[in-house]
């Protein structure tokens, strides 16, 4: 089981991926910088949901932080 899954009522629940604005807040950068990271393919599993909002999975963000903050 990955650390991102929670076990609730017999089901594994994945946390909702972050939006671009939430990513900006988490990385403490500007929206332009966050968008540049997204377009630079730093988050390989990012996607646009059915509402047209970018979603970035937490494992991608954590991997980026680990590799770029050493």
Image (cartoon, rainbow, N blue to C red):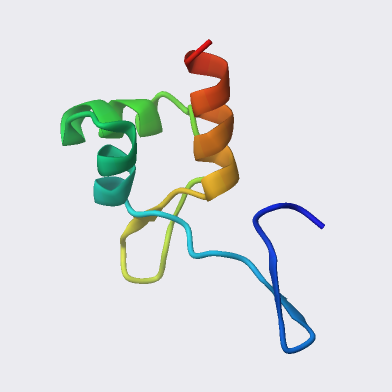
**With respect to residue 9, does 4 lie above or below?**
above
Q: Is residue 53 left or right of residue 16?
A: left
Residue 45 makes an appearance in the image: no
The image shows residue 22 at horizontal and vertical percentages of: 30, 50
The image shows residue 47 at horizontal and vertical percentages of: 47, 52
Q: Quadrant of the N terminus?
A: bottom right
Q: Is residue 49 left or right of residue 67?
A: left
Q: Residue at x 24, y 48 (%)?
A: 21
Q: Which quarter of the picture shows residue 15?
A: bottom right
**With respect to residue 25, does 7 lie above or below?**
below
The image shows residue 60 at horizontal and vertical percentages of: 56, 39
Q: Residue at x 29, y 26 (%)?
A: 36
Considering every residue shown, the one lying at the far top of the view is 70
Q: Residue at x 59, y 43 (%)?
A: 59
Q: Is residue 50 left or right of residue 66?
A: left
Residue 34 makes an appearance in the image: yes
**With respect to residue 58, does 65 lie above or below?**
above
Viewer-proximal residue among 28 and 38: 28
Q: Which quarter of the picture shows residue 28?
A: top left
Q: Which quarter of the picture shows residue 33?
A: top left
The image shows residue 7 at horizontal and vertical percentages of: 73, 75
**With respect to residue 33, does 57 lie above or below?**
below
Considering every residue shown, the one lying at the far bottom of the view is 9
How many marks overall? 0
């Amino acid at each position: 089981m990955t650390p991102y899954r929670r076990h609730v009522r017999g089901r594994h629940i994945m946390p909702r991926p972050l939006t671009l604005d939430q990513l900006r807040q988490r990385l403490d950068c500007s929206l332009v910088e966050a968008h540049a990271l997204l377009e630079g393919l730093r988050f390989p599993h990012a996607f646009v949901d059915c509402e047209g909002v970018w979603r970035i999975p937490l494992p991608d963000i954590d991997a980026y932080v680990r590799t770029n903050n050493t």
